[in-house]
Amino acid sequence: MKDSERRNLLLDTANRAAEYLASLDKRSVAPSADAIDRLASMLNEPLPARRSAPDDIIARLDEFGSPATIASAGGRYFGFVTGGALPASLAANWLAGAWDQNSFNTVSSPAIALFETAALRWVKEALTLPSSAEGAFVTGATMANFTCLAAARHRVLQDAGWDTDRNGLFGAPEVRVIVGAEVHATIFKVLSLLGLGRDRVVTVPADDQGRMRAELLPAIERPTIVCIQAGNVNSGAFDPATEIIAYAKAAGAWVHVDGAFGLWARASSALAPLAAGFEQADSWATDAHKWLNVPYDCGVALVREPNDLRQAMSISGAYLLASEQQRDAIDYAPDSSRRARAVDIWAALKSLGREGLAELVDQNCRQAKTLAEELRRNGVEILNEVVLNQVVVGFGSEDKTKRIIASIQASGECWCGGTNWQGQPAMRVSISSWATTDADIERTCRAITTAYRNS
Ligand SMILES: *Cc1c(COP(=O)(O)O)cnc(C)c1O
């Protein structure tokens, strides 16, 4: 391919992407069934025998792929906890794609090694976490939880005289894992991956907002890992970190924080008090693709003591000392070859600055409050205390809830998904995108109210 052809291909792609993003406000948030069918038929083709022209491929991708997407990059997608993609971060992601760097160590890409160090420093500053903590850029909070809990497993067993890295868990002292009743489902998956078992956890009851009840923590003996949560995936509530961490650490336990989106409250001076105390933990998992609005996929694992992470992750085994000259990502991350996620994070934080980040978080929380108030005024029941960016809406019976959610999704006006809140079927609205305007919130409120009244 000639340089000029390649240039045209990339420019054409950029134009198509810009058109796509500009179209989101006018189209249905959910794709039509027809768009999905058309994509499925297009893809129903055996592996082609011959080459295809790159510009035809992109044209096909745009013609069949774009209409079949969920408009989650727009302002009216409130499913799961998703977040959009800041323009600077999206563009940085493209440029880094062109660089095609392998980020596994400093020799494979000295540039990305520098971006990693810088992005890690900024993430810690933004979240006001200890500046000496080490970290890894991973696919998301699930892998960040995995990475942190692998470090925790290593440390608590080493303190008990057991070398997990050499010997695995066969014959190891039992590690007790304490979680709250509202722990995120991905923690269970991670515990099973780590050989700690989903069903062996000790579960501490939660209150009506999903917060772990610190006064019900059991007596702790070593080796123990306590998993707490900054930001319940439904209500947005925070576990009482100060009390739990003081108690757990006095007993020698490791405290891990799942803060996929909630930890970002610490970037706002107005909201930081909600997330106070979490800085005392031993490890933190968070997402960049949620509230920081970095493109998928992007998560960050942070561990207070660099050696705990290094010994659990190092490719050369736990026996070599860290090089004093350079930091190699492969010694801190579960993966080896990786894309340059740090570039997207660096660009997002550079584009927002402290001020922009605080405004993003504040704005989404204000929008959540407004939406909840307006819905309440229209007779819709709100089931949670709206303290952050999450609104849990109650419509009554399971059948009715399903019907109303389906009708909201079918309206194309916005997209919210179902959940279960305190044993009750509910709808969750998660406001986590820079692209959500106040007009989007008004439109969403109308769509929800209409579906509710017509039910
Ligand atoms: C989203 C979320 C996760 C999982 O994050 P992924 O990025 O999907 O891996 C874990 N914990 C909480 C609290 C979450 O909100």
Image (spheres, grey):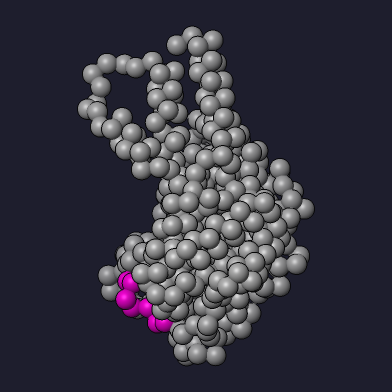
Q: Nearer the viewer, residue 141 or 419?
A: 419
State the image coordinates of residue 324 (x, y, percent, origin top left): 60, 48
Any part of residue 306 in sight: no
- Give the quadrant of the C terminus: bottom left
State the image coordinates of residue 230 (x, y, percent, origin top left): 57, 69
Q: Quadrant of residue 409?
A: bottom left
Q: Nearer the viewer, residue 447 or 246?
A: 447
Q: Quadrant of residue 42?
A: top left
Residues shaded magenta: 197-203
Task: In the rendered view, tell whether residue 133 sits above or below residue 84.
Answer: below
Task: In the rendered view, tell whether residue 124 sits above or below residue 73.
Answer: below
Any part of residue 26 in sight: yes
Q: Nearer the viewer, residue 134 or 47?
A: 47
- Give the quadrant of the N terminus: top left
User: Is 130 inside the magenta-drawn segment?
Assistant: no
Our reading of the magenta stretch's main secondary structure is loop
Q: Quadrant of residue 188?
A: bottom left
Which residue is pictured at 32% across the width and 76% down the height? 199
State the image coordinates of residue 397 (x, y, percent, origin top left): 39, 75
Count of labels in the image: 0
Which residue is pictured at 64% across the width and 38% down the height? 87
